[in-house]
Amino acid sequence: MDRSRFEDLVGEAMAEIPKRFRKLIENLTVMVEDDCPPGTSLLGLYHGVPYPHRSPASYGNYPPDVIVIYQRPIESISRSDEEIKDHVRDTVLHEVGHYFGLGEAELREIERAVREQRKGETP
């Protein structure tokens, strides 16, 4: 998949985040990179100070938060463009969850529920 289409999928996935949460996402950049860091098998990565750990008085002292979505690892586990889309959606949701301070167990539970909901939406 070309980079432009992949970036569009990332943007679409961000737009799917419920509005009440999107309104809380400030100072966040979402980027696409080709590969994850050497020695890792990541699909995405959140860099920053999770939302619940910030204090309003010191917010300006934090660098911008960044979510990086790794294109090649996602493509390597996907058999079709539709699977790429699903993995991008799952990865964006996962990394935004880290922004909100959620841990891995909580995120797995949310991801399971979202996948079940998506199955019900399929025509």
Image (spheres, rainbow, N blue to C red):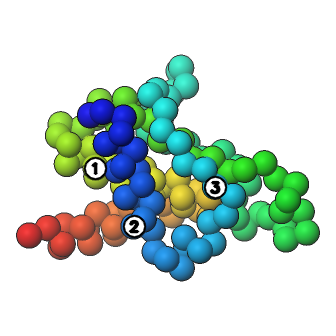
User: Could you give the CA–CA distance between mark 3 and mark 2, rounded to whole angstroms?
Assistant: 16 Å
| Percent x, y of residue 2 | 30, 33
| Percent x, y of residue 16 | 39, 67
Question: Which mark is first along the chain, 1 or 3?
Answer: 3
Q: What residue did someone put label 1 on?
A: 85
**In the figure, residue 1 lies in which quadrant?**
top left
| Percent x, y of residue 87 | 32, 48
Question: Which mark is first along the chain, 2 or 1?
Answer: 2
With 4 as the anchor, is 42 left or right in this view? right
Amino acid type, label 1: Lys
Q: What residue did someone put label 3 on?
A: 28
| Local crowd size for mark 1, using a 10 Å CA cut-off: few (<14), some (14–19), many (≥20) | many
| Percent x, y of residue 115 | 28, 63
Circle number at residue 16 = 2
Identify whether 79 is placed above or below 110: above
Question: Which mark is first along the chain, 2 or 3?
Answer: 2
Q: Secondary structure at mark 2?
A: helix
Amino acid type, label 3: Leu
Q: Secondary structure at mark 3?
A: strand
Q: Residue furthest bottom?
A: 20
| Local crowd size for mark 2, using a 10 Å CA cut-off: few (<14), some (14–19), many (≥20) | few
